[in-house]
Image: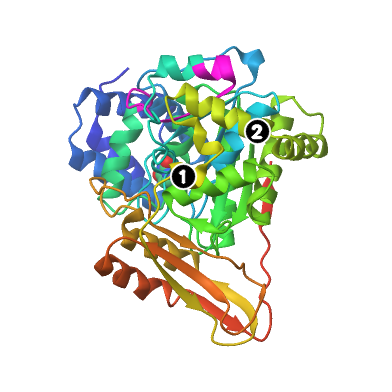
Amino acid sequence: MTAFNMIRFIERKRDCGKHTGEELHTFVDSVMRGTVPDYQISAWLMAAFLNGLDDDELMHFTKSLALSGETISYQPEDRIIDKHSTGGVGDKTTLILVPLVAACGSRISKLSGPGLGFTGGTIDKLESIPGMDMHLSDDRFREQVNTIGCAISGHSLKLAPAEGKFYKLRDVTGTVPSIPLITASIVSKKLAGGAYGYLFDVKCGSGAFMCDAVRARELAAKLTDVSKKLGKTCLSVITDMEQPLGEWVGNSAEVYEAVEVLSGRGPSDTRELCIFLAAAMLEMSGRAKSRDEGAELASKALDDGSALDKFAEMIRAQNGDASVVREPLKILPRASHTYEIRSDRDGYLSRLDALLIGEGLRALGGGRLTKEDVIDPSVAIQLPHKVSSKVAKDDVLIRIYYNSEPRFRESLAYVEKCWEVSERAGKRKLILDTVY
Ligand code: URA
């Protein structure tokens, strides 16, 4: 093989050329060995952002990122399933799905990244349970999946470390919103995590990475294509994120809502989405013969308490206070002040903007602007009505739970603009599309 020439490599992508698998592998390897300076990596990222990567390049780049560090492996016959959401406001599905799918008899492993921006992170949410260890070693993580059927943990830096390096540079070079680069980033981490099949929940709407349906569909198709090319069973579901999911937005508040849904109660949209996604995962793992059978198993596990018991088992295994499943309001931190926004007329709730609500929560201290920001798990925004609900004048549309007056005022500037009551109901679909 001729020596790797980084300048030629950048020029090829700049001029819309195609890289071989070997070149991409050498590139990632050189980045890991520290022989390529950040300015050259950044130049290539911009070229790839502008000119794209074709399916072959994407598969090789993804694989090289995945193999840049340690990997977790399971017995293939165990058909471990992993789930990934592209992130949204009030998206607590992971908290519910992981114990739910395990309670139905499939094994599920969930490695999560940190929450950044206005969408909350699963790790932050679960850390509002006292004692909860969200940073398991790879061995302990795998052991827990094998013994109790499920685990959720922060992504260890040893898995796909090159991806972390590329992501940091994308974050500061304006190259994050590229569908091939996002796909390689997501799938490489899944691949290193060792699962047999993946379910991708691609959020679409104002409170999501992908604001429009065309881009969401494109990302969903790429995630599915690349995963399949890499030998994985895979399904992408596109779901609505124009309004937040469920009734609660906030770290401890979302754990509360998860406990409600796992107890057979909770908001109908959160329950509906979790049953839909669980059914797909149960079919993928072979535990259910069809999606309908999977949905039946999942509904039963929510209603008979077995999913809630599995959640308690997972919390105990990760050193958390499992009494949160019986007395969530006693165990979870809650903010000290409340403010209510009421409807100024009779009508239908026609808009509940997820982005503004997400920004409102972040302003309260419930999300991060920088990786160093410390989260306040107790602050929350409650949304008692969903878009298209009939409301009367003076009905409470939004409750803000806060601890600091200046933060509340900053948050209110977003939240007071997030809603609209009209004469006609603006209906929204929750599950927009499925990409096989
Ligand atoms: N989430 C990821 O994991 N990677 C991206 O590039 C974007 C969102």
Query: Which residue is tagged 2?
Result: 307
- Looking at the rendered structure, the kind of residue marked 1 is Lys
Q: Residue 312, position in %: x, y?
A: 55, 30
- Looking at the rendered structure, the kind of residue marked 2 is Ala
The answer to whether residue 71 is seen in the rendering is no
* Occupied quadrant, residue 71: top left
Q: CA distance from mark 2 to mark 1?
A: 21 Å
Viewer-nearest of discs 2 and 1: 1
The first of marks 2 and 1 along the sequence is: 2
Q: What residue appears at the point 55 percent right and 25 percent down from the top-left corner?
A: 313
Q: Residues within 10 Å of mark 2 (few under 14, many from 20)?
A: many
Q: What residue appears at the point 27 percent right and 63 percent down from the top-left corner?
A: 404
Q: What residue appears at the point 69 percent right and 26 percent down from the top-left corner?
A: 285
352 vs 69, left or right, is right
Q: Quadrant of the N terminus?
A: top left
Which residue is at the far top? 75
- Number of marks in the image? 2
| Residue closer to the observer: 59 or 320 | 320
Q: Residue 247, position in %: x, y?
A: 56, 59
Query: Which residue is tagged 1?
Result: 330
Q: What residue appears at the point 56 percent right and 38 percent down from the top-left corner?
A: 326
Q: Is residue 305 above or below residue 258?
A: above
Magenta segment boundaries in residue numbering: 144-160
What coloring was used for the rendering? rainbow
Q: Residue 185, position in %: x, y?
A: 42, 38
